[in-house]
Image (spheres, grey):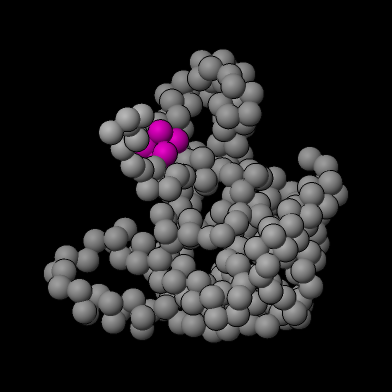
Amino acid sequence: MDCKKVEKDTIRFITTVVSEAKADGVVLGLSGGIDSSVVVTLCAKALGKDRVVGIFMPASFTPVEDQADARSLAERLGLSTLFVPMSPIVEKLLETVPMKRRERVAVGNVFARMRMLTNYFVANSLNRLVAGTGDRSEILIGYFTKYGDGGADFLPIGHLYKTEVRELAEYLGLPSRLVQKPSSPQLWEGQKAADEIPVDYSVLDPILRGLFDANESASDIAKRLNVQLDLVEKVQRAFERSRHKRIMSTTPPRPLTF
């Protein structure tokens, strides 16, 4: 990947989106993970540190090292930051809504959506846009919370696969522990992306490139990559099942005449 060109093009994209919206800058959540670290670095380069606000939104189970990494990067970039702990907010909602069963994924999605609400409250208050942190790998397989981490005004790295994001992070000079840190949405204690996605990104990304960039058949991809056909088809099914996440709420087709 030509990281220099990707950096330049993405910076141009960020400045254009913010300018066209007549916004004063951006806000985004800082998790200490690879995606948010790359996005905030690019936004600071594109807009300047005074037009970027980073929001720390840890839960009670957020690893202390992730919080430290997020703070360290924000300080390095000279950003204004806010600290908004999520667990008290989520617990208040759970106490208020009369649901006896607390299913883990449902509660985890509440954390993601409360972070989205916080981002938008701050953004609306400051006339800024919300910069999302999703990458192409996770967008294509639907590995995000609808109206949660998927809720943003624009996605600066939405065109890059996870392995490309890591390559760009290294080019941008981010600390090696950030570049190599295992991905996690941090929606519950001990959550790891590797336990939930169809296969590790090192294999997932070449499959996705074959399916969506090269328009190859599943069987051709399986042969070329020397992987099981069932795995490629599993990735295809993940894309199909999550289609609704990537579009606005669906409506019936409008008749030509009434």
In the image, is residue 82 above or below residue 105? below
The image position of residue 254, as x and y in percent, is: 34, 35
Most foreground residue, 55 or 20: 20
Q: Quadrant of residue 34?
A: bottom right
**In the image, what residue occupies the spot 14% across and 69% down?**
100
Which region is colored magenta? 239-243
The residue furthest right is: 4
Q: Quadrant of residue 76?
A: bottom right
The image position of residue 19, as x and y in percent, is: 72, 63
The image position of residue 51, as x and y in percent, is: 72, 75
**In the image, what residue occupies the spot 22% across and 66% down?**
102
Q: Quadrant of residue 31?
A: bottom right
Residue 218 visible in the displayed image = yes
In the image, is residue 74 above or below residue 10? below
Residue 197 visible in the displayed image = no
* 113 with respect to 173 (left or right): left
* 168 with respect to 200 (left or right): right
In the image, is residue 175 above or below residue 4? below
The question of residue 85 being in magenta is answered with no
* 103 with respect to 167 (left or right): left
